Image: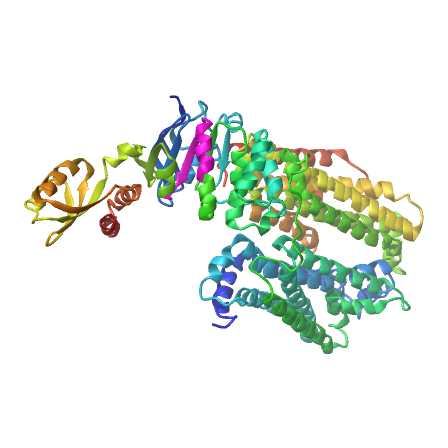
Amino acid sequence: MSSMTGTRALATLAARRDRVMLVAWIYVLTALIAGTAYSFKKLFPTAAGRTEFAISASHNPALLSLYGPLYGNSVGSLTAWRYGGFAALGAGLMSIFIVIRHTRADEETGRLELVGSAVVGRNAALAAALLIAVAANLGLAVLVTVALTLLGLAAAGSLALALAIAGSGLVFTAVAAVCAQIAGTARSARGLAIGVVGVTYLLRAIGDSSGPHGPRWLTWGSPMGWAELIKSFGAIRWWVLVLPAVIAFVVTIAAAVLAVGRDYDAGMLPQRPGPARGRAQLRSPFTLAWRLHRGALASWLIGALIFGVILGSAAKGIAGLLGSSQLRHIMAALGGTKAITNAYLAAIMGFSGLIAAGYAVSVVLRLRSEETSDHADPVLATRTSRLRWGLPHMVIAVAGTVLILVVVGLAAGLGYALRAGGTGEIGPLIIAGLAQAPAALVIAGFAAALFGVVPRASVAGGWSALGVVVLILFLGAALKLSHWVLDISPFQHLPKLPGGTVTAPPLIWLSVIALALGAAGLAGLRRRDIG
Amino acid sequence: MSSAIDVAGLRKSYGKVTALDGLGLDVASGEVHGFLGPNGAGKTTTIRILLGLLRADGGSATLLGGDPWRDATTLHRRLAYVPGDVSLWPSFTGGEVIDLLGRLRGGLDEGRLASLLKRFELDPTIKARAYSKGNRQKVALIAALASDVELLILDEPTAGLDPLMEAAFRACVEEERERGRTVLLSSHILSEVEALCDRVTIIRRGRTVESGTLADLRHLTRTSISAELAGPPEGLDRLPGIHDLVIEGLRVRCEVDTDKLDGLLRLLTGAGVRSLVSQPPTLEELFLRHYADDEPSLDAAAGRAGARA
């Protein structure tokens, strides 16, 4: 029996288990890129309009750090510029989730032990996970190429962009495979791999926003950078694709080598002994919940800080984006460059609200994973009531979300102050962050209500709700969705801050809805069966 | 003696699947009660209803004089539970889990904790993810045994323990009995139940099929007899209550209903006995016969097991 025996059977099984998730990932990533192309087509129907936009965009450090430089003025160039890097990031995340799910996560649950005792080689699970991830990325590349070509973009450029995006996916497939060998748990393997994504994203952001004498070469170190460096809708540099191919291959080999020297369900990082006794504080359902959430919250806060500082410091250049255009006069009439800066900052805060909603949903759904992994039973068999078990997680979801949004606002304000001077934006940005909380918590409340009433649907339902809200934000306007569809998203009802006026009523009733949903979840939890 | 657990006509279904179908269980205060049944018989479902984790569809259940669903949190102060499949938070050490569960229950006996750690040879500084199944089981057992409670509910607690640790576990349960605590021990390890339990309830497919002391149940069992005789046995095949009779010259092997043993021995001594081996009925045999009722293949297996015994 070779070490790969059984790979095909495992890959079939994995594809069967993932069929919904894979389709959703590929569909959303394709829809976002196609939607972006479509909205540029509608927004700038003439070459002159696009040229003007392109000239201003390529001189703006804010946009450079966010999206990288713009090569050319075709709809294709604009699409690749606006969304290529994000799609590369999305493909990377998709690949990481696939690989970890079918390697370490399956080892942790013991599923692979059962499967591994059958006629299955010791590297078969890793090989199967890699196969599925590669197939998903190739599928994504095909769909993106087809979708962009159908929208009238150059076929060669569409293919180049699609391959660059898939290339990023392949590199992170290999990175995830290595992380799966190193880390001690599935959770930390996932965290490690996503950390690599974060670092390479920053490399690209720094490389692209630094001037001609700065470290522009940093962009080459990032899979998110390759999607722009390939110049898909200009003079295509096909040879850039050699980078992901070679790196993915070498890193995969490294993972295979590491896999040989590793035991089942064990990492390479040493296991240190921990305390023999629980600390005195570890004595209530609340401290238990805090212990389970504190590590993740710390990482989220660090991420929020970096995100805020980078995007806040980019705000100063935004006003220059509309350079010499007629649009500028219109904008000036509407409130001047200040209004443009504020619109940019408001967009960032709106984006932060979505990210915070993602955090809140993940905290609430931890209750469900505590339940399904049998961690809840022993706790609920003590004098801990269901309310006292569930409530702390929800309190942490609320407090953590508010904290993350305050940190983003504060960091964006500080970043703006660093670049533009003056700390005047800090206060308004913190308020803008706080204003996002009610909408983010409505999404989390929805997940909580599902958890209490229809627990089996809570994980899929909670994340789908977030996905719907993301799609509405990114594509709602471009697809000209009717008002009542847009109004499903709680984020549509928030005031645009900073710059807009704070209107209390929507914030109040969104908070009331969030609270009511959370209460419904807890009420359901008290009545239903556990498990 | 009052009842620690009193369950009658308990019903629970998951969709179309019926897990409990009129189950009854009566555990007296201060006894060690064996709760036996094959996988999927409904042992864990019963226990989870008793813990208020599931709500029964019908029937009645009383735990320590209260309603397990309505009074869950007040009742839980007085009991400790060891799940069949112990799953711990991977980043917690064993010691942290023991302390946490103990504190959530309302306190641990420190002296007892120290001695239990020693008896079960558990290193409490290891992270839960690195523990084997047996060691995770020990963590839950120690946390339960070190708690100051009246009732212990143990769901297949020795699965994954090695024989030495099983012996340590038995000694601990003996001590619990001496302390006057009530123990509900769900198991399918018959030797363990035979060694520890005062009374036994056997269930299958969500119903109680037998309940009583081991002595009560032995009336329902057969004793295996194997003898070498001086002369040929006459009329053995006409005796009532004889099963699986094999006569090879002067050697005789058979099974006899335990209440018909007297008649058989009379007949054998009449023929003259050179040697006699009598195997007392085991719970195992009883168990196999109960589960063999409507499954012919198992019936044959029970017959063979009986003949071997």
User: Is there any visible trace of residue A373 in the rendered image?
Assistant: no
Is the residue A98 above or below the residue B66 in the image?
Answer: below
Which quadrant of the rendered structure holds the N terminus of chain B? Answer: top left
Magenta highlight on residue B186: yes
Is the residue A105 above or below the residue B100 in the image?
Answer: below
**In the foreground, A236 or A366:** A366
Where is residue B140? Give x, y as percent: 53, 40
Q: How many marks?
A: 0
Residue bounds of the magenta highlight:
B170-189
Is the residue A458 above or below the residue A384 in the image?
Answer: below
In-image side of A299 versus A467 (left or right): right
User: Is there any visible trace of residue A346 in the rendered image?
Assistant: yes
Where is residue A435? Give x, y as percent: 76, 40
The residue sitting at 42% across, 38% down in the picture is B45
Is the residue A499 above or below the residue A62 in the image?
Answer: above
Q: Residue furthest right?
A: A421
**In the foreground, A268 or B237:** B237
**In the foreground, B274 or B130:** B274
The quarter of the displayed image where residue B191 is located: top left
The residue sitting at 47% across, 41% down in the picture is B168
**In the foreground, A181 or B18:** A181
Which coloring applies here? rainbow
The quarter of the displayed image where residue A508 is located: top right
In-image side of A463 versus A403 (left or right): left
Magenta highlight on residue B9: no
Where is residue A30? Give x, y as percent: 64, 62
Where is residue A82? Give x, y as percent: 75, 62
